[in-house]
Amino acid sequence: QVQLVESGGGLVQAGDSLRLSCAASGSSMYAMGWLRQAPGKEREFVAAIKWSGGSPLYASSVKGRFTISVDNAKNTVYLQMNRLKPEDTAVYYCAATTERLVRLWLSPQMYDYWGQGTQVTVSS
């Protein structure tokens, strides 16, 4: 069993930055991801990374603006979000997976455990 607790969401203006944190406890997982869901839309992949810190993967919509990282000593995964846009507004979820094929991290269905989500709102 894995427990995931997100924090760091909030209301910001376009162009601002936010850092999301996800504290993990319980069984070890192979990779960690951030996914998001905007009102009326399906949940979508944002970024993922091996728990060891390797193989970061990003959605094209956030590549170059967002950075995912892991602090193994703190059992925490971060999502640094820069140059935020109104279209980044969503509930952001931290998730964990045992899937080893990096290309499959793109699918929300591949994640086994989920946090409760944290709201990010970007005003124009």
Image (spheres, rainbow, N blue to C red):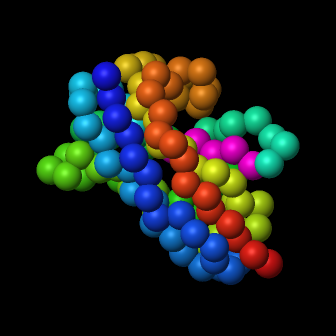
Horizontal relation, residue 4 to residue 91: left or right: left
Residue drawn at x 55%, y 54% as measured from the top left: 118
Figure check: 83 above or below 61: below
The front one of 64 and 110 is 110
Q: How many marks?
A: 0
The quadrant holding residue 37 is: top right
The quadrant holding residue 123 is: bottom right
Residue 97 at what x, y percent from top left?
Answer: 42, 25
| Residue farthest along the left direction in this orientation | 73
| Rendered-image quadrant of the C terminus | bottom right
Figure check: 95 above or below 85: above
Q: Main secondary structure of the magenta part?
A: strand
Q: Is residue 22 magenta?
A: no
**Residue 55 visible at all:** no
Residue 80 at what x, y percent from top left?
Answer: 46, 63
**Residue 79 visible at all:** yes
Horizontal relation, residue 122 to residue 28: left or right: right
Residue 3 at what x, y percent from top left?
Answer: 34, 35
Residue drawn at x 26%, y 37% as measured from the top left: 25
Figure check: 29 above or below 49: above
| Residue farthest along the right direction in this orientation | 40
The front one of 54 and 112 is 112
| Rendered-image quadrant of the N terminus | top left
Residue 4 at what x, y percent from top left?
Answer: 38, 40
Horizontal relation, residue 18 to residue 119: left or right: left
Q: Which residues are magenta?
A: 33-38
Residue drawn at x 39%, y 47% as measured from the top left: 5
